[in-house]
Amino acid sequence: MISIIIPSYNEEGNVEHTAEVVTGIMEKNHIPFELVFVNDGSADSTWERLEAMANRDERVVAVNFSRNFGKESAIFAGLEVAGGDACVLMDCDLQHPPETIVEMYKIWKNNDVDVVEGRKADRGKENKAYRGFSLLFYKLIKKTSGLDMDAASDFKLLDRKVVDALLRMPERLTFFRAMSSWVGFKTERVYFEVAEREVGESKWTTRGLIKFAINNITSFTSAPMQIVTICGVLTFIVSLILGISTIVQKIIGESDAGFPTVIILQLLTSSIIMFSLGIIGFYISKIYEEIKNRPRYIIRDIVRKNDKGDK
């Protein structure tokens, strides 16, 4: 059996249609499955619809967070609740085509493969700014951490041993896309066309994407910390050049008062110090979040057919 995990946030217009489409495809191909929907603190009627679906169909599991914890937390909650021999992650808006799950399943079942990774054949209808930002983000990840995530997505199938390895990773600040690559295991790729979103709009904002990128880059590489060292070296070189220039001018008797030079040098060093402290402070804040050791998420309800649920 495979568990299909579907994080859902304000998806009242999608959850029932998504369940119907995925169920139809799985039944047509005779694939045993369960659908694990994780409601990430939605403000609309997403949970009520998921709860009703779970009470009607024993193949649907509905998980409800106590509040919004974010997609990353929803993914790991789904992995923890899932009971399948393999797990598939997909989006609720059907931009990850469910037909590709059949291809993933066959590769996993008929080959010695632990991970079947969905890669985007193209990025769909994205604006140029978003596309450029995404490409820059993945290049930085590859350059600094060695993880090749170009055209990667959360849409992938994971064998149970891979799921167990991910659940043993203790960090609170997670990045599933990179973590599932970091654990290794034998991987094959399938390519899919990004479908158009049928209902609603993307929940990502520009601010959210920037925050997402910064958090995940700093979670998987210490490269930003090296900027502090580089700035220190550059400042030392500039100071050395200015110092030598001042000494030479003093010796040959052409020395000026030097006030503008001192001000410029102070402004430069002060700016670099503040910038460096900002980077260090950001890493310290991440350490602070980790050492609190709070749970990644809190589950309020789990609903299955003929089950009162856990509260």
Image (spheres, rainbow, N blue to C red):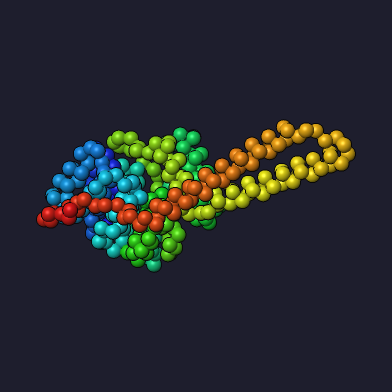
Residue 91 to residue 115: above or below: above
The residue shown at (42%, 57%) is: 179
The residue shown at (71%, 46%) is: 237
In percent of width and height, residue 21 lies at 25, 46
Query: Which residue ends up furthest to the right in the rendered image?
Result: 252
Q: Judge by depth and name the residue closer to the eye, 122 or 284.
A: 284
Quadrant for the N terminus in the image = bottom left
In percent of width and height, residue 7 lies at 29, 48
The residue shown at (13%, 49%) is: 56
Residue 87 to residue 136: above or below: below
In percent of width and height, residue 163 lies at 34, 61
Badge count: 0
Q: Judge by depth and name the residue closer to the eye, 125 or 75.
A: 75
Residue 121 in sight from this viewpoint? no
Residue 145 to residue 197: above or below: below
Residue 183 in sight from this viewpoint? yes
In percent of width and height, residue 5 lies at 29, 52
| In the displayed structure image, the side of residue 277 where residue 86 appears, left or right | left
| In the displayed structure image, the side of residue 81 where residue 95 appears, left or right | right
